[in-house]
Image (cartoon, rainbow, N blue to C red):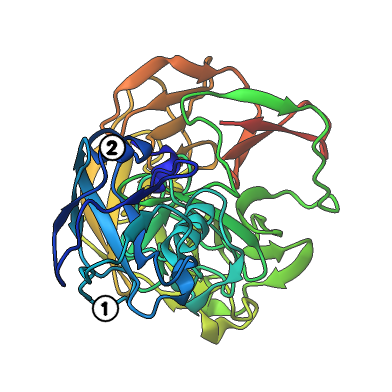
Amino acid sequence: MSQYGLDPVKNFAIAELASGIASGATSFNVVSGQGALFPDPSTEGAYNVTLFNSTDYPNPADDPSKIILRITARSGDAFTCLDAQEGTSPSAHNTASKVYKISLGVTEKTIVDIGTLIQRKGGQYATSGGSANAQTLSVNANITAYEAGDTFCFLAGYSCTDTCTLNVNSIGAKTIYKNSGETLVYGDIMAGDSVCVIYDGTNLRLQSYIQNDPATITRLSTSYTIKYSDIPFTLSASLANIVYLMNSSGLLYKSGTLQSIAGTALWASSTNTLNSIIVGGYIYVYLIQTATAAQIYRCSISSDISVAGNWTQITISGTALPFAGASGFVGFDGTNFWIADGSAGFIKYSLSGTTFTSISTVTVTGSSYFASTSMVNSAGIYAGFTSAPYVRFAAHTGTLDTTKQISQSTLIGFGKPRSAYYTDGASTIYNKLSI
């Protein structure tokens, strides 16, 4: 077949018709031996030719009755065709004493196909429209259906806040996934970002933000520094260039600036704030009150987190929130929230509106694990243990994979992109691991 999906070409492919043809004809013959000058559609693909009166119009463009035919088959000098292509009109070419010829050359379709190829393989840069999680893209290419390998590069017109789709030229919205297969979350595409996605045959894969293989845990740096003015904290959540840190007095820090979670609405006077998670444009805070009860509040990340009225308490249905040990958020797998139950297991909750409903409990074989040193994503569970190896990878069912583990006893938490932080003994130096 023709290279890159373009119509096949041959140099100097021109032939004289053996006899005239009527309007609407779907077959014709050329002078003996001249058919070999043209590609064979059975092996190289169909192509367009121009049919014209060469007696009166040596230049095909001058013939008012010229037409473009699409050649779909050739056997020697016998051609099968589709009549009147690319906006030309059916016309008889059978006037006595006139010579008619076909010529294989560049037509408008050729140029359009090249433009489409450039778009599919290289991408035409444009700004996305639509909305935050349903973005659209208009490109100057004749694309009527997605093909595996299609590449689209664009300037993001919006910041996604959750699972995001892209609809190119109105041919249908496709979900954008990270290269690792995870759904997008807030911060993966920000307004003004240069974004590149590739269609994998089913969905779009984000190439401009490439994740590491979830099957590996490797050390990236020994000098990643976080300064926090000597206030103890747990690494809470992060997105884009914003980092949220929490201390044991119920205070939330945003990008290094103190943001008090004010008022009794969030138990500020008697709460051990353990951790938080960002999902769907909200930051969810997990609060434990003196080891007797737990609550979850959420606030839009676009709101002032220091205003108590911007926070909403989450209703819990089914299994009550755990509060013993280091209970708290572990992660979001793209569909459900996971919460560590001290040493008893991980509880999976679905979210509807502002209600968490328990689905199941999963136990990872081994020692106890902690919310601040555990993480869940679409790949599985990264569980933090109290004995070596301190980080272990398991499927969502809890089945351990002993080939994916790491011994770092001072692991303090997980961040974004998929990375872990641990101390080497100095209070303000935290090393970064890629997982």
In the rendered image, which residue does mark 2 sit on?
A: 40
Helix, strand or loop for disc 1: loop
Question: In the image, what residue occupies the spot 22% across and 36% down?
Answer: 42
Question: In the image, what residue occupies the spot 34% across and 56% down?
Answer: 102
Question: In the image, what residue occupies the spot 14% across and 69% down?
Answer: 22
Q: Quadrant of the C terminus?
A: top right
Q: Nearer the viewer, residue 272 or 41?
A: 41
Q: Amino acid at mark 2?
A: Asp
Q: Is residue 73 left or right of residue 422?
A: left
Question: In the image, what residue occupies the spot 63% across and 22% down?
Answer: 408
Q: Nearer the viewer, residue 339 or 151?
A: 151
* Quadrant hosting residue 174: bottom left
Q: Is residue 185 visible?
A: no
The answer to whether residue 233 is above or below residue 241 is above
Earlier in the chain: of badge 1 and badge 2, it is: 2
The answer to whether residue 113 is above or below residue 140 is above
The answer to whether residue 77 is above or below residue 263 is above
In the rendered image, which residue does mark 1 sit on?
A: 89
Report x, y in % for residue 294: 41, 59
Q: Quadrant of the N terminus?
A: top left
